[in-house]
Structure formats: C-alpha cells, structure tokens
Amino acid sequence: MVSAAEKDTVRVWRNARLATLNESLPGLGIVEDGAIAVRDGRIAFVGPEADLPAEFSAAETVDCEGRWITPGLIDCHTHLVHAGDRAHEFELRLAGASYEEIARAGGGIVSSVKALRAASEDDLVRQTLPRLDALIAEGVTTVELKSGYGLDTENELKSLRAARRIAEQRDVTVRTTFLGAHALPPEMNGDKAAYIDKVIGEMLPAIAAEGLADAVDGFCEGIAFSPGEMAKVFDAAKRFGLPVKLHADQLSNLNGAALAASYGALSADHLEYTDDAGAAAMAQAGTVAVILPGAFYFIRETKKPPVELFRKHGVKMAVATDSNPGTSPLTSLLLTMNMAATLFGMTVTECIAGTTREAARALGLVDEVGTLEAGKWADFVLWDIGRPAELVYRMGFNPMFARIRSGH
Ligand code: DI6
Ligand code: FE
C-alpha cells in the first residue's frame, strides 16, 4: 500500500536510455539521454532529459548512470497457481511417452487436478509465491494467473481466491482468468456436454458473483473441448461481461484462432497449427497472438507457430511463459524471449514488445501499462545492459538493476 506521503512524491529518473515501446515511434521507441518523471504512481513525463518541464526541477532525482529502462515486463499467460509438480511424467516422456498419451491414460492435467483439490487455499498461495517471485526478480510487474486445475466449483473458486490473495502479498498487478474448460474432470465420466453445462450454469455464475475473474479462457483441442463447446462457454462469458481468450490450435488445427476472433477475444494462445484464415481472422478482430515457446520446447513440438503469417496480416504478437507443471515448467520471461527468438525467429523488437506492450494488449491493459508514456502507471525496469538485444540474447542471466512499480 502506498502511504499518503509517498503518493504525493514526485520523482525523476534521469540520465537513462529509454526503450519506451511507444507505438508512434519506430522499433523500440528509443529515447537517448532520457528522463521519466512520476507523480502519484503514474508517469507524468517521459522523453529527452533536455525537454523535462521546469515543474520537475525540484523533484527528488535518481541518476540512472546511462542504464536502459524498459516498461515493466508482463507475463500474460500463466498457470502459476498449481499444486505439486509433474516431474514423474517428465521422466515418462523422456522414456518415450507423448504428452497426449499421458493425458489419455489419466495423467496430465488431471493429475494436477488431484493435487490441487488436496491442497488448502493457504497451501496453494504458499506453493505459488516462489514461482511468482522468480518472475518478479526478472522485472515482471504484471502477471496473469489462470485457474483450471480445480475443475469443480469449490476448487476453481479456491484457485481464483488464492490468485487474488497472491496479488495482495506481492507488489505486482495480477489479472485472473477462469479456465474451467481446461480438461474434463474424472467424476464427469466422459460427459463433456454435462461438464460444459456445469462450467456455464454453476461455476461461472459463482465466480462472477465474487468478482474473481477478469477473463474467461478454455482449451480447444482434441484432448479437451471442441469449438462448439467453447462457443457455449464464450456465449456465457459475454453474458457476464467478461472478455475471452483461448488455448487454440496447440496440438492440431480445430480453427480455434478463428473461433476466438469471432468472439473478439483479447488473445488466442499457442497457435502452432493456426492457418492463414485463422491469422486473417485474428487480424480483423484485433485478437493478439500469444506465442508460448516454453510449451513448444518442453513437449518437443516440431510445428512452429506461423509467425510469418501473423506478420503478413498484421497480427500483434505477445510472448509469455505459459508457466505450468505439465508442458512448460518455466518461470523466466527473459529465457522465454530467447526461445521465441531462437526457436521461432522473432526479432529482438518483437520479443521485447511481446513481453511489454503486446502482453498488456492481450490482457486488455494497454491503456494502463506496457509502454513508457505519460498517463500510464509508473511500472518500469532499469537494466545493466549495453543494448536492448541483451535481454533476449542471454540464457539464464538476469541483468535487472532495479524494478519500479507505481513509482516505487
Ligand atoms: N495447454 C497447455 O500447454 C497447458 N494447458 C493447456 O491448455 C498444459 C497444462 C498441463 O499440462 O498441466
Ligand atoms: Fe496455457
């Protein structure tokens, strides 16, 4: 919490090199010899230090000694709230089993469901915080947390309440997403239609009544839910005024990207199997493509997301960890950027925009965070680097110097 005295503080960061990500500037929106002035937790001025308005000349000043500043990093797709791990399944996969085989044999997401149901809300918070702390240590200031390992009303509520509590325990902005349509829980005995009815008729109303979800997501896949089933969930989300997103075309092309676009989804995520029509529909709808190289790498997928098609159609691309126990036990957004570049050929600018401005867009927050622009929250990171490419280039090294959230 910000005290009244702190709130009134005006502070200036000077002698910095800024990657503003301001869309009206080319590339990273670089400003050399830059300064940022912050008032009441928001950016009041950003630009060349020579242009700093006189009203800030008496302000408390931080000399950045020529360091680079970027917007605070944003991880816009995570399943950080989970219990236990799936290291055993990892060993099975190393011995030759596939992710889908393990899922069909009752492992996979369902084994994380058992673990989450057995954990208390306190336990869940306690187990999640170290993973969140790893992200924060690399400059993450906004994170999305999905439910989706509860798969009944009580346990989905527990997951989202844990997510809201986590937001109070750390200096980070949390957006929560209800992912009830993640997998079919065992007690439904294969009856997907009945489960979808429960998601819509029981779980979503209970979650909306407590204001626990900022968005609704689903897993549209052969091993999960069909486009028709997801459409029902999206219709219900619309009735509650909640924006939607979708795990789409990860393992096969069910035209999930086009389905998401037809609902004006904030994002469609994964997208390895998305085709030209899917990319065109996303561009038309302004649906962000969230690229998740951690899952691609970890399950040794070989079909790459069609980055070229997204560029061709002008689809905005975000990059996120997909941090989860089954397909992406990854808690480094910096390493994720390296993977997006190395595995998918994304450029340095695309990777950095993908973890700042475009990630903000994928969460519906681009008017508040994601770039260094006057009026936005003062969330930014000082880096000990010589050029922005270093954020993407290194593997397993953290050059963060300082992390500022809401000007503190
Ligand atoms: N796609 C994924 O990669 C994760 N969820 C999803 O819908 C996997 C989640 C898990 O295996 O626990
Ligand atoms: Fe995911």
Image (cartoon, grey):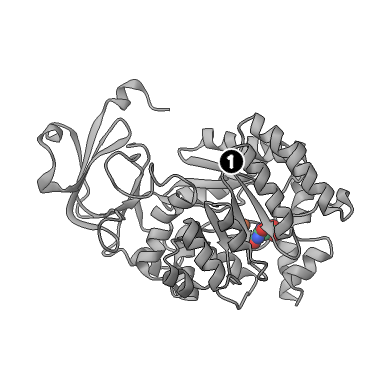
Number of labels in the image equals 1
Which residue is most to the right?
Answer: 189
Q: In this orientation, does residue 83 appear?
A: no
Q: Nearer the viewer, residue 224 or 83?
A: 224
Question: What x and y, as percent, mark residue 175?
Answer: 53, 42
Q: Write down which quadrant ligand 1 falls in.
A: bottom right
Quarter of image, res 394: bottom left
Q: Nearer the viewer, residue 256 or 17?
A: 256
Question: What x and y, as percent, mark residue 171?
Answer: 45, 38
Question: What x and y, as percent, mark residue 386?
Answer: 26, 64
Q: Does 160 sit left or right of 102 as displayed?
A: left
Q: Nearer the viewer, residue 391 or 182?
A: 182
The kind of secondary structure element at disc 1 is loop
Residue shown at 38% from the left, 41% from the top: 368
User: Which quadrant of the rendered structure holds the C terminus?
Assistant: top left
User: Which quadrant of the rendered structure holds the N terminus?
Assistant: top left
Q: Does 343 sit left or right of 99 as displayed?
A: left
Question: What x and y, as percent, mark residue 23?
Answer: 30, 56
Residue shown at 30% from the left, 22% from the top: 5
Q: Does 144 sit left or right of 93 as displayed?
A: left
Q: Residues within 10 Å of mark 1 (few under 14, many from 20)?
A: some
Q: In this orientation, does residue 7 appear?
A: yes
Ligand 2 has an atom within 8 Å of the beta carbon of the residue at disc 1: no
Q: Which residue is mark 1?
A: 242
Quarter of image, res 147: top right
In the rendered image, the vertical position of residue 258 relative to residue 160, given as above or below: below
Which residue is most to the top?
Answer: 4
In the image, what residue type sits under mark 1?
Leu
In the rendered image, the vertical position of residue 144 relative to residue 61, given as above or below: below
Residue shown at 26% from the left, 58% from the top: 29
